Amino acid sequence: MNCLWYTEAAKSWIEALPLGNGRLGAMISGEPFCGQIQMNEESIVYGGPLDRINPDAAKYFPEIRKLVLAGKIREAQKLELFALSGTPQSERPYQTMCDVNYSIDHEAGEIQNYRRELDLEKGVVSTSFVHNGAQYRMRCLISEKEDLMAAEFFTDREEGLTMSVLITRGRFYNCAGKAGEDSIYIDGDLGKGGSEFGIQARAVSEGGSVQVIGEHLVIQNASRVIFYVNGVTTFPYRKKKVEDPYSYLKEQLASYTAEDFGRILAEHVEQHSKVFNRSVLKLKEDEGLSELPTDQRLKRLREGKKDKGLAALYYGYGRYLLMASSRPGGLPANLQGIWCEKLEPTWDSKYTININTEMNYWPAEICNLSMCHEPLFDLLERMVKNGRRTAMEMYGCRGFVAHHNTDIWADTAPQDLALAASYWVMGGAWLAAHIWKHYRYTMDQAFLDRMMPVLEECVLFFRDFMIEDHGEMIVCPSVSPENTYYQADGTTGSACAGCTMDTGILRDIFHAYLEGNKILGKKASQEDWVRETLDKLPLYKIGKYGQLLEWREDYEEWELGHRHFSHLYPLFPANQINEYENPELVKACEKSLERRMEFGGGHTGWSCAWLINLYARLRNGDKAEEYIDYLLNQLTAPNMFDLHPPLERISGIPWVFQIDGNFGGTCGIAQMLLQSHLDEIFLLPALPKNWQEGSITGICAEGGFEVDMTWEKGRFSHGWLLSKHGEKAVLRCREELEISKDGIKVSVIRDEKERYVFDTEKDAIYQIRSK
């Protein structure tokens, strides 16, 4: 049952239930009579674009590089802090849009039969309860088609709704008041150089009256009230630009009536459910667990009890959150997706591109939400212009570079003063690696052609930036995000030359560049250099503990249980270390994980989610399930939002909602059930022993394939393969298979790896059965 539900109203923000249409978001707390709906708009970011490139970077960069190569790490890092850090050192913060506060007149009396729920399939939050014999109901949705929030309040008590509504935003807005006889507004700006914004709410009722008194909407003696609420900005980088928020909103909201709510609801549910139902996971669970409120099910997990159904719910929830926070034409999902309650959130709730933003989009392709990936590519294209300036003015290089953060203005200069994170030139390259992943799933050559200039600019930067050292082509200076090592003299350092993650990202970028141009029939301008450089990239090496080396030197780590698994990038999300090509390195990855987990790794939500994916790639389904349970019972809020816990080493960091763990965990569950990164479709590669019965529909594979499948007693039973582009299919399964089309057996070749290889027709469906 794809539904989160509770028997009490939310007591805090991370108990509220999220709605979103990609641009607009809301958190519904469900208080019976007096409460608020907190709202966000994707471009509500304080301030405008800034030129933050450090004017001294180019002067001191050569010296920094020499110091790193000479092993003078402390001196190099001190100079990095002064000369490479952005000016100012921070980018712009994402912010809450507003609170819609409501108050309903009522007499004393107990609340009975309270229920608050989020229906993932419908995209609707509803609250219902009984008070003094009267039934009350609230339903909220955010429509993609109408591009607004609609909230319905209803009671069966005649003329029983007398209520008021007020929009607030702390003290951070300019004007508020009457926008019409039944409408209120607030407006303001987001600081020097920032966008202007406007927010309006309009009320319509059945029975009773609606009026505006001061800055309040006042409704008296109604049986049903609908609020239509929207907020917009003048943010310039969107297809539908708004120059006058007040006039735009007034015109938009003026036409809606009480009768329109039913139509908007029906259209929204139809549109939303079509996308949500593309992929649904079902796991046979113990009888009665789905009848328990969601918070009680999470509590049972913390008590050490099993609940397979929560993993299936988490999969559906992750897909729902991506649908709600990243839609074509808008901005990408940020560190909190689209939901943010603060004016100054932790880590600015922007885009951290040394893992978090990339993780947000791990489930997009495999979980049948490819269109949700599009905002990331739109931002990446905008980053190129800024990245060219950053590359030239900081490093004297051609091409495009971005460091470990960006924002809605496509900033590419270093962010923060963090020695272990800020001075890293691979952020834009990691984002660009998503180009090839999107192409491999969609086989969309028009998209590939559009994005090849980004890969070209990325490659051009590394041609100028990389150096040869001891016969190897490396990136210097760099870091292995966000890790620290001990030097031989006992001092710590982060700056390095040629770490494993850099090499992994470069291999992916160079491969995509060469293969993309080949597919498009184009001559790659940097082809000769790329091929030569590929041969000179450092090889992956095994350290003294049997672990995969993170740096070129076999350093001891300062934090043995570090939350990042940066050096395991070649295992996942890349496919460079695998059982076919380098099984000895697969074992080294296993050893690296053993060591990290022995000392407490995976202790943040997103880090735990990465573990699930890594163990799925290692075909260890039971271990992957163990960390699904850990993610749910230790690092998940009551509303199933992912959490980042306080860090002992960084004072002032509380428990923080970060959406990356939701998305990473969703992808990890999908990776346990299907993998296609090795030019094969592996069915149930990491199925846990505990998941004996189940099914999944609409899970996607590279090459343009889509799979439905069912398993019984821990074994693949039957399924269907949709070939969207008529590519050759290569199936791998632990069971013997029979493959047919329209009831006729398909001619299949068994290759040297015992895989099932057969030609497919475009848009044809093939039935797969175990013998």
Image (spheres, rainbow, N blue to C red):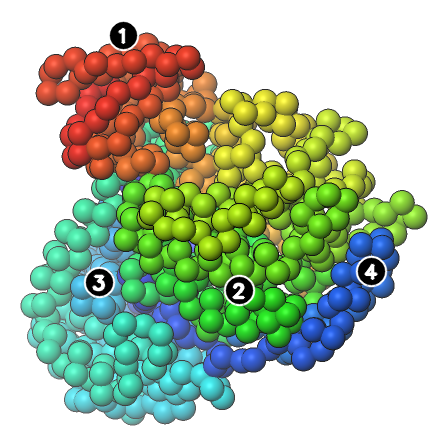
CA–CA distance between discs 2 and 3? 40 Å
Give SS at disc 4: helix
Q: Residue at x 41, y 75 (%)?
A: 44
| Residue 745, x across and y down, in percent | 16, 13
Are the residues tagged 1 and 4 within 8 Å (C-beta)?
Answer: no
Q: Is residue 712 depicted above or below 466 in this figure?
A: above
Left or right relative to 161: residue 586: right
Q: Which residue is mark 3?
A: 143
Instruction: Residue type at mark 4: give it.
Output: Leu
- Closer to the observer: label 4 or label 2? 2
CA–CA distance between discs 4 and 2? 25 Å
Q: Is residue 41 depicted above or below 590 in this figure?
A: below
Q: Residue at x 73, y 68 (%)?
A: 61
- Closer to the observer: label 3 or label 1? 1
Q: Earlier in the sequence, mark 1 or mark 4?
A: 4
Using the rendered view, name the quadrant where residue 615 is placed. Answer: top right
User: How many tags in the picture?
Assistant: 4
Using the rendered view, name the quadrant where residue 311 is placed. Answer: top left
Are the residues tagged 2 and 3 within 8 Å (C-beta)?
Answer: no
Give SS at disc 2: loop
Left or right relative to 125: residue 504: right
Instruction: Residue type at mark 2: give it.
Output: Gly
CA–CA distance between discs 1 and 2? 54 Å
Give SS at disc 3: strand
Q: In which quadrant of the rendered image does the C terminus lie?
A: top left
| Mark number, residue 771 | 1
Mark 4 Cα-neighbour bin, 10 Å: few <14, some 14–19, many ≥20: some
Q: Which residue is mark 4?
A: 67
| Residue 354, x across and y down, in percent | 57, 54
Q: Which residue is mark 2?
A: 399
Seen as rendered, the residue at the extreme right is 489
